[in-house]
Image (cartoon, grey):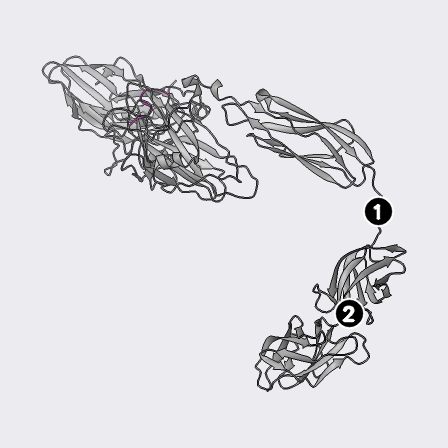
Amino acid sequence: MLSSNYRKLILLFAAGSAALVAQTQGASPSCIVTSVTPTVRAEGVAERMGDIVFDCTGVPGQQVTGNLALYLNTTVTNKQLSDGSLDVALTVNGSLANAKGVLNGPNQIVFSGLQFTFPVDGRIGLRIANIRADATYGGTSTTAAGSGLPGQPVVAQLTFSPPSLLSWNRSSVQIGIPQRGLLATSLQTLIPSQIGSPLPDNPTSFASFIAAKTFFATTRVTEAWEIAFEARQPTSDTGTRIILRFNGYPTGARLFVPALIAGSNAAAPTTAGDFGGGTPNAGHYVPASHTLALGRVIGTDALGASGSVAYTGSDQMTEVQLTGGTGMAVFEVLDADPQRLESAQIPVFITLPRSPDAQSNLLGTNVVFGPLVGTLPLSSLPSSPRFRDYPAQSDCSAFADCNTYNAKLGAPPARTSFQLLPGGNDLETLYITNEGGNPLMPFTATVQYTSGSGWIRLDPEYDIKARPVRMVIIATPQMAAGTYEATVTIDAGQAGVARYPVRLQVLPRPAPDTTPHISQVLNGASFQAGPVARNAWYTIKGDNLAGNNVAVTVDGKSARITYNSATQINFLVPADLAGNTAPLVVTVSGMTSAPTTVNVVDANPGIFSPGIVNQDGTVNSPENPAVAGTTVAVFATGVLGPNNAGVIDAKLHDVTVTNPPYAGPAPGSTGLQQVNLQIPQYYPTMTTEVSLCTTATGMRICSPPVKIHIRQAQ
């Protein structure tokens, strides 16, 4: 049954037939209609269909004038020329006809006012060539090609108006059989981030990447029938293009591909060696040899259109720009053999800096014909050919090597017996490997508990490629002492299953250690380690320092304690220590620490922080500086010997103060010293340093400097 559009077209031509001129002499001319029915790419939306040929017989001198129309069961995608006509050609006996094809609706081409006269032999031939149409649905739906099934034949319905002037033996002809044209297999590689993948010194040379042992993964592309890979034709804007789209690449990764790919029948095919082994070769293509050659196209748009071929010489590499871990490489068919099925290997080299972080990345490659059609209406295609975004199907069946690349689970033995205290944990790595040819090996990691639950954690619990699995064993604080059992299963389906019986022995919880421990003895003002000074304030750092009856002894002499917590005790060193060394002991609740031997000296100066008081009695700080010309009091410990012996001086900014206004014990505070310093009147606003020095030990020693904040006098 004819469609409504087709019936409207016939009525339109019939209504206009009165205005047409037809001169007949004798019987009405008739034509034998034949068509070429090529295989066309089911991914293509601007596929060139077969020619339609009319072998017509009429009376010599008989003239025919009328409208010839084609109605396709899919969308017409010829380009419109500047005069509004289409780039479809109608010839009469090999010469262009007087009528040009125009688009009349999305599916119709009309040659209006066609006129021709039969020659003396009464034979004339018409040919319609360069019909372009959307082959992605073939008149049914887009799902056929999209799912990988061949589309329905592309059919043209033929009409002539007025119908009485020209008749033919058939009004419907097939002009194309859509079949998927692109097959591809992309191998994948996993780059351990701790190892990285080196960038060669010369990243423009294929041989340099091989020599540097840069990681790579090859994509093999294969044509499904002999002319699916087609170099540029006179009626095309480009040759067939193949787009490789990359995704999932980590930060810092860089991709490189050859500028020219020599195909399977070239003088030396391009190969990196991962498809069936072999010696890596950049490839050698002899120009115009009618062997498959793919050239990298640089500067394309996001759909793979425009740009220019980058190839200028052999062994040449080009970089693929990555943005957010994604990128695209476009190759154009430069040459091909229309009589043979051809394939090509496109090695993709991946460089990645070393990283201390353990990570794995699924590096994806998607292969499609290009340029893609995008979102433009098919009637306004910017160029031909154009293709739908249909990912290529696997080509392993064409090479009978599907089984060659099967995955195979490798799971070597691992440590599966653990002993832990409650609250402890341990780690073991299960080194899951893939010992087969297929780089993809989906697996899951699960735990089945025989006793207890939740004491094993696995990371990752699933992946699509082989990678180590971290097995963390956790003895929670609530777990009772005893033996726990479970089984860890790595299930990779047909690639194999590995099972690890795991046993955890939770040990009895030991009695808590309440013995006090001394870790550091520090100057109570500067908090720096060093010898302890007699009659000076010091701080003990450690554990279990809080409790009942806390005491500190130095060489058996009791020390005065002013503060204590579980980790700190502030105490005054006895003034009457006799020797140069002494044992220091802490006692808490009747339990005594191990003795710590300290060196004993008469002085070891340290300034408290905060420990500088301005003349007005406020604490010196960035928000409250001392005014130049005023006097500040600096409070310290360990500056004087036990009998207040020694000479005290100070260094303030760039001035050494040898006779401070006051330098001696702080009134009413044992072990605390006070040194008054007058700030020079000329000092500007600044933050500088002050330190105190003493000769109490027989030699001049100084405290660590501390910050002092000064404001210029007004």
- Provide the residue designation for mark 1: 512
Residue 448 coordinates in the image, percent (x, y): 72, 27
| Up-down relation of residue 512 to residue 462 (above or below) | below
Q: Residue at x 40, y 30 (%)?
A: 368
Mark 2–mark 1 Cα distance, whole angstroms, equals 32 Å
The magenta-colored residue range is 224-230
Nearer the observer, 463 or 152: 463
Tell me which label, 2 or 1, sits earlier in the chain: 1
The part of the image, by quadrant, that contains residue 139 is: top left
Question: Is any part of residue 534 visible from this angle?
Answer: yes
Magenta span dominant secondary structure = loop
Residue type at tag 2: Trp
The label nearer to you, 2 versus 1, is 2
Residue type at tag 1: Pro
Q: Residue at x 37, y 24 (%)?
A: 222
The part of the image, by quadrant, that contains residue 108 is: top left
Please give left or right for residue 208 compared with residue 131 in the image. Answer: right
Q: Residue at x 33, y 27 (%)?
A: 133
Label 1 neighbour load within 10 Å: few <14, some 14-19, many 20+: few
- Provide the residue designation for mark 2: 537
| Up-down relation of residue 557 to residue 9 (above or below) | below
Residue 377 badge: none
Residue 79 coordinates in the image, percent (x, y): 29, 34
Q: Quick check: is 370 in the magenta stretch?
A: no
